[in-house]
Amino acid sequence: MSCTTRPELPPQLHVFVRDWLSANHVVLRSDAGSVVIDSGYDKHVPLMLALIASRTGLDGRPLAKLVNTHCHSDHIGGNAALRRAYGCPIAVPAGEAPLIDAWDERTLLYDYADQRAERFAVDEILMPGRTYVWGDLEWRALAAPGHAMGALVFFNDAHRILISGDALWQNGYGIVMPPEVDPAALPATRATLEMIASLDARCVIPGHGEPFMDVRGALERAFARTSAFEADPLRTVRHVLKALLVFSLLDRERMLLAALPDYMARVGVYRDFNARFFSLAPSALAEKLVGELERAGAVHRDDGWLKPGR
Ligand SMILES: [Zn+2]
């Protein structure tokens, strides 16, 4: 099977492939109680609810549990709405639960990175090393620190399927904090990739993008990215800020270029990272980030506006 073909998955497992603003939703149907993994971003809550309720989603079944791979805004944004709709308990990784309990907007990159999330309460804690039965399949919860230090991935040994969240994508993985901000993050990222490599997964269901089977290729690209970050910590800093800016641009759909310097001075992560790593005027930081994103084809300028894509 080529890596562009959608992998075969057990019939009770359905992946709603979303985009970069909302993480994918994994639906695991079972007569014993269905489970949904990750609920997307705040902005897409109505669409998420419609997908989950649809024929390929729960199709009239109750929702027994909502699970999160980690607690970034694009994975938990629909948690409160799903609980309202289905009355389901919410289970988050043990390492992430204290951040949610405290609603740590800085570590979770909510307000601090100009991202929105409706607050919710944690009902159940998922422990690394434990096995859970969701959709009549056994899933081993494995610690996957790096992108989020409390993140879990879920591995089904029988089908060798890995639900990887943002720990591994077909091309890379989610942002990792620079060593000066969290010295453990980059080493943990490498260790998590080594752990994933040891699983011999046949198929990866990532947090973003289509499920894929070329796991070896994805790991090679992820290790290469990690080596590049290790060799140049400032690259990590730029990558974090550029990824967050594109996220906010997708959320807002367009941003006034003339307002970007004020935005860089006002939004915590840009203000703090600039002071710590670049010491640029806010307008120069904006120009630097926009210029690099423009050259990569991630954004374009249009009549005074910054917009996503080419
Ligand atoms: Zn994430």
Image: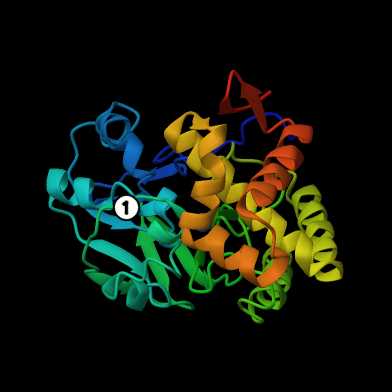
Q: Which residue is drawn at 41% across and 43% down?
A: 25
**Which residue is at the far top?**
303
- Total tally of numbered discs in the picture: 1
Task: State the image coordinates of residue 305 (x, y, percent, origin top left).
Answer: 55, 26
Residue nearer the viewer, 143 or 137: 143
Vertical order, 229 against 184 (above or below): above
Circle 1 packing at 10 Å, graded few (<14), some (14-19), many (20+), is: many
Task: State the image coordinates of residue 115 (x, y, percent, origin top left).
Answer: 41, 50
Residue nearer the viewer, 239 or 99: 239
> Left or right: where does residue 164 sit relative to residue 58?
right
For disc 1, the marked residue is: 117
Q: Quadrant of residue 220?
A: bottom right
> Left or right: where does residue 106 sit relative to residue 276?
left
Residue nearer the viewer, 31 or 48: 48
Quarter of the figure that contains the N terminus: top right
**Which residue is at the far bottom?**
183
Q: Name the residue type under label 1.
A: Ala
Residue 203 makes an appearance in the image: no
Task: State the image coordinates of residue 73 (x, y, percent, origin top left).
Answer: 40, 53
Quarter of the figure that contains the C terminus: top right
Task: State the image coordinates of residue 302 (x, y, percent, origin top left).
Answer: 61, 20
> Left or right: where does residue 83 sit relative to residue 129?
left
Badge 1 marks a residue whose secondary structure is loop
Q: Does the residue labelled 1 lie within 8 Å of ligand 1?
A: no
Q: Quadrant of residue 134?
A: bottom left
Q: Residue at x 25, y 61 (%)?
A: 90
Residue 272 makes an appearance in the image: yes
Q: Which residue is drawn at 26% across and 37% down?
A: 58
> Left or right: where does residue 123 sit relative to residue 272?
left
